[in-house]
Amino acid sequence: KTEDSETGASMVNGGGAVYEDKEENDNSRSEDLSELLAAGTKEVHEQAENTQFVKDFLHGRIRKELFKLGAVALYYTYSAMEEEIEKNKDHPQFAPLYFPNELHRREALARDLEYFYGEDWQGQISCSPATQRYMERIHEIGREDPVLLVAHAYTRYMGDLSGGQVLKKVAQRALKLPPTGEGVFFYQFDSIHSNKAFKQLYRSRMNELELDISTKDRIVQEAVRAFQFNMEVFQELEEMGKTIQEDVLDGGPIHGHMQGDISK
Ligand code: HEM
């Protein structure tokens, strides 16, 4: 059962015929966690897609200083999440979703930050208030209610696997980053060959967790909260974007105040 967890190789055994039969024979609400999560976060996903920061980013309207702050926020978020995942990797209600080699992003983000801020990157970054609230919630559930880590892992990793390639290209183009991947290692999952197949594996693992319906509902509620934490970070970034002194964009006549060079 676990041999595929390192390589992501055998991804074919889905939720099993039991569920399929059940779904064919009655039309009651599916109890598959993957479906409850997709349905339960549909509305908040649409809200997230429609935040100004996300819309701007998708259209290539992102400046380097703001992109760097976004990477900083992600670094703190994934550090908290992956710290709690490590502590709970043997918890029976999380263990099947433990894919450090395939998913974990902290290291990739550290490389991106070193590229942007230089060797002393750790001395130059700090955690924003919205990111701090997000981190505190992750640590709280890691300590007190680790089954809810499922919600946080789902919200970030499944989202990253869904939109990563597009966002990577947008960022490289808008920020003129090198094609070798520096600055966007975060978006690159080197150990995952097919995002689609991996998402299917992840969904089937979520569906195989032994959870009663009220716990599934609590996980869905926590995923909605996770989306909201992300939106609060986006809103904060958008606000910071209004005050950032921006360096010169090649060929971009739109910025009024050219306040001199900001390193990278
Ligand atoms: C899935 C688009 C922003 C989290 C998806 C999928 C698309 C998509 C097309 C479906 C992929 C598939 O079914 O294979 C977008 C667009 C966004 C955006 C266009 C911004 C404009 C976000 C944000 C988050 C997020 C900000 C959370 C922080 C997720 C998650 C899934 C997902 C968790 C998996 C849904 C599931 O299958 O259960 N997204 N997304 N997305 N996205 Fe987004």
Image (tube, grey):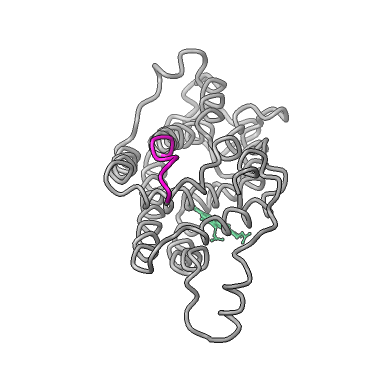
Q: Quadrant of ligand 1?
A: bottom right
* Residue at the (48%, 69%) spot, across then down: 39
Total labels: the figure holds 0
Please report the bounds of the magenta region as a residue range.
Answer: 85-92
The residue positioned 50% from the left and 51% from the top of the image is 54
Residue 205: x and y, percent?
55, 55
Q: Report which quarter residue 250 is drawn in.
A: top right
Left or right of 255 in this view: 219: left
Is residue 241 something that shows in the picture?
A: no
Residue drawn 43% across and 29% down?
Answer: 245
Let me know if residue 122 is in the magenta part. Answer: no
Q: Residue 131's spot in the image, x, y percent?
A: 35, 39
- Residue 149 visible in the current orientation: yes
Q: Position of residue 191 (x, y in %)?
A: 67, 37
Q: Where does the image place residue 225, in percent across and percent down from the top left?
A: 35, 56
From the viewer's perspective, is residue 208 above or below residue 183? Answer: below
Query: What is the quadrant of the C terminus in the image?
Result: top right
